[in-house]
Amino acid sequence: MQSTLHKPAFNKYRFLWVLFFVMPGLIIVSVVIIYPLFASLLNSLYSWNGFERQAFVGLENFKSLFTKFPYNQRVPNALMNNLKWFFSAMLIQNVFGLLFGYLLSRNIKGHEIYKRLFFMPVLLPIIAVGFLWKLYYNPQFGMFTKIFELLGLARYSQAWLGNAETATYAIIIMNIWRWIGFPTLVFLAALDNIPEDCLESAHLDGASEWKIFSKISFPLIIPSIMVITVLTLIGSINVFEQVYSMAGLDGSPNYATDTLGTLFYRTAFGSQASTIPVVSIGSALSVIIYFLCLIFSVASIVFFQSKEVEL
């Protein structure tokens, strides 16, 4: 007896119903992501006179970013600062977020209050947070200056945002304070979703807390670690508001806090201390930023998916 496979009939109304719900998302993605990307790519292949496209120059604008002054100095400097942001976020923000998430998953006393306290800074507008922390860092009347004085360490107090060696890290500390609640709650949710049977069986077998965490809990929250890592990558490459609110568009002092985000804005749209906007080179830089996000995000996803385990 031969079995006949029947293809499901095309349902026009079902298709239109699905399209009705999908179209708003597609329109938003097209307007916010796809169109700007291709527009930037097109603009980066032409020379500009400040207002409109001129001659086709191919990859010359990309070449200028690494060979023409001042871009050949600004791009490596900004990229290095972005790397500082990423590694600081991974080693401090995400590691401590995992630690705090683990402690909260143990239902310590007052854990419900701690959840809200950790997440509260995430809800605050970044411009307001940046302005507030700029006051904290003030060398005359700032909170940190007063703390150093109370501890008898006034000689170590300084203009944290005015020193090229400390300015970037001062802004990073502000950002860690603001965002640490996000990985904390993500890891907490992941740890709470681990089946109790697995943990109880390990306890009955005499496994220590460290063994249970490293051999059971940690492998099972790899998907959450992947999400946090990808978001950290994208956020670190696109740093803008934090630097803008505390150091200005020019990444003061002397471009010490400059990032790819502030460099792009300054190049494409200009600033008080810079020359006229250079749309072509700014567009080339935006394309590079996009592909950096894409490449490293995909690489992270592939890496962590190879480490995932299933029950």
Image (cartoon, rainbow, N blue to C red):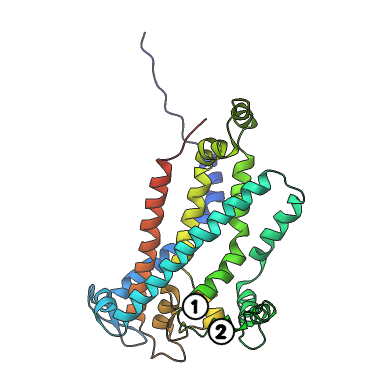
For the residues carrying marks 2 and 1, which lies nearer the camera in this image?
2
Give the amino acid type for the residue marked by disc 1 in the picture: Thr
Residue 88 seen by the camera: yes
Q: Which residue is mark 1?
A: 166
Q: Which residue is mark 2?
A: 158
Asked which quadrant contains residue 292, the reply is bottom left
The residues tagged by marks 2 and 1 sit, at their Cα atoms, a distance apart of: 10 Å
Q: Position of residue 287 (x, y in %)?
A: 35, 68
Q: Residue furthest front?
A: 152
Instruction: Tell me the element at label 1.
Output: loop
**Residue 267, numbered label:** none
Precedes in sequence: disc 2 or disc 1: 2
Q: Residues within 10 Å of mark 1 (few under 14, many from 20)?
A: some
Whole-percent x and y of residue 180?
60, 60
Q: Is residue 37 left or right of residue 235?
A: left
Instruction: Describe the element under mark 2 as helix, strand or loop.
Output: loop
Compared with residue 199, is residue 180 higher up or lower down, i.e. above or below? below
Q: Is residue 30 visible?
A: no
Q: Is residue 242 above or below residue 302?
A: below
Give above or below for 137 relative to 223. Answer: below
- Whether residue 2 sits left or right of residue 102 in the image: it is left
Residue found 58% across the figure and 31% down from its top: 207
Residue drawn at x 39%, y 86% is 277
Tell me the residue at 70%/54% (across/down): 115
Residue 26, horizontal then vertical, whole percent: 49, 56
Q: Are marks 2 and 1 in contact (CB under 8 Å)?
A: yes
Residue type, numbered disc 2: Gln
Q: Which quadrant, please, contains the N terminus?
A: top left
- In the image, taking residue 115 as reference, residue 58 lies left or right, namely left
